[in-house]
Amino acid sequence: MKRNRLIAVIVILALVAAAAIGAVVFLLTSARQRGNVVTVGFIYDNEEKTPYSYAFLLAQEAAQSMYQGKVKVMMISNVMEEQLSVPLRSMIDNNCDIIFTNCYGDMRTLAKQYPDVQFCQVSSDPYPASEASPNYHTFKGRIYEGRYLSGVIAGMKLKQLIDSGELAPEDAKLGFVAAYPYTEVISGYTAFILGARSVVPEATLLVRYTYTWSSYTKEKQCAERLLDDGCVILSQHSDTVGPAVACEEYMRHPAFHIAYNTDMTDVAPTRSLAGTHIEWTPYVTGAIRAVLDHRPIEETVDGDVHPLNDMSAGFDKGWVAITPLNAGILPPGTQEAVDGLIDDFRDGKINVFQGDYIAIDPEDESQWIDLHDGYAENADSSIPTFDYILQDVVTVVN
């Protein structure tokens, strides 16, 4: 979960010259006609080419293409969460009808003050009903589904290495470069290892935290340490391609990578197996359609509606995706396995958090849960809630 981000602010040009911070603003006008034209704002927490923001930028571009002649788009990037109100006010002053952000700062306060503007924020923490307003909305794809499926891909590669004699079953160790020990991160890497263990039951996971969201150097160093620890396939919940590059450059033993937020085969063409990401386009385009049609967002977007104008969905509604497989380094049959599992997710046949596992609360080791009967992730909200560590399967190291 993207909280407490420590990202530098870039000077805002033109449209927010009077603002206190300085992110860059572009007014992208795809609407030249008069009449029913909606002004849409996008606020990004980082450079729009970094993996997390880039995935969201694709939704922005899809909306511009879909609604040509009907939308004007205003974009501000490199916004730290504690400064979110500044670009928000700039967009309000520029008559935005709907504003999207992948930042986790306070958006609810201004939503209450400007009831005619729709405020749409990637979900982070639960909040009390007293802070809710009809024009404030949250959303997020069920990324644990993609994490599980990317774990299956990693498991299939592990099995190929074991079957070829390159790897002993007891050495089937995966690694995970994690930003912070937040619930979304823990939920994601748990789903990842459970996917891998569905193929290779001996697989284990080693986790290292960087305690930053977007440091290429720290993420690459963390990945290198995991590889030195004997991990043969890494994944990540962090914002740079550092772990992918580390795998591409590593020479001591087999080293492969599962990407997050974007395809990373451009920087790791011989090591990046595949990746997973939230697909933001269904929500963004649907919410804009709602404003164009003067309809409630939750009645227009195709997804699961939770209390307080919160929405989620997974493979069933196209809110989660797998990046193209790097077929040249994956075992035969991987694509068919992926396609079949996506169908199973769409049909509700897979309960990811289930099995013969005991999961320990990392904040209080006396508290634990038994996953024999399963755990329903994202059942009542788009915010992940699974924050337990699988005993004897997941090891967190400093």
Image: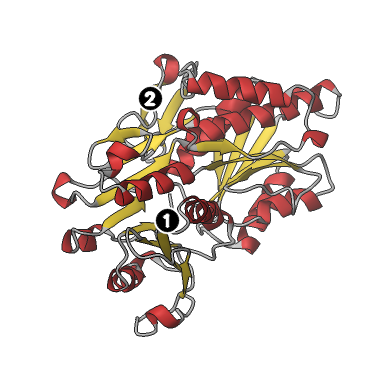
Number of marks drawn: 2
- Relative horizontal placement of residue 287, taking residue 191 as reference (left or right): left
Q: Quadrant of residue 84?
A: bottom left
Q: Which residue is mark 2?
A: 376
- Looking at the image, do the residues carrying marks 1 and 2 touch, with CB atoms under 8 Å apart? no
Q: Residue at x 79, y 26 (%)?
A: 331
In terms of secondary structure, where does tag 2 sit?
A: loop
- Name the amino acid type tagged 2: Ala
Q: Residues within 10 Å of mark 1 (few under 14, many from 20)?
A: many
Q: In whole angstroms, how far apart are the C-alphas of marks 1 and 2?
A: 25 Å
Q: Residue at x 82, y 21 (%)?
A: 163
The numbered mark at residue 51 is: none
Q: Residue at x 81, y 44 (%)?
A: 270
Q: Residue at x 85, y 29 (%)?
A: 166
Specify whether residue 21 is in view: no
Is 125 or 372 nearer to us in this picture?
125
Q: Residues within 10 Å of mark 2 (few under 14, many from 20)?
A: some
Q: Residue furthest left?
A: 130
Looking at the image, residue 149 lies above or below residue 137? above
- Name the amino acid type tagged 1: Asn
x and y percentages locating residue 349 in the rendered image: 48, 16
Q: In the rendered view, how is the structure colored?
A: secondary structure
In terms of secondary structure, where does tag 1 sit?
A: loop
Q: Nearer the viewer, mark 1 or mark 2?
A: 1
Specify whether residue 27 is in view: yes
Upstream in sequence: badge 1 or badge 2: 1
The numbered mark at residue 102 is: 1
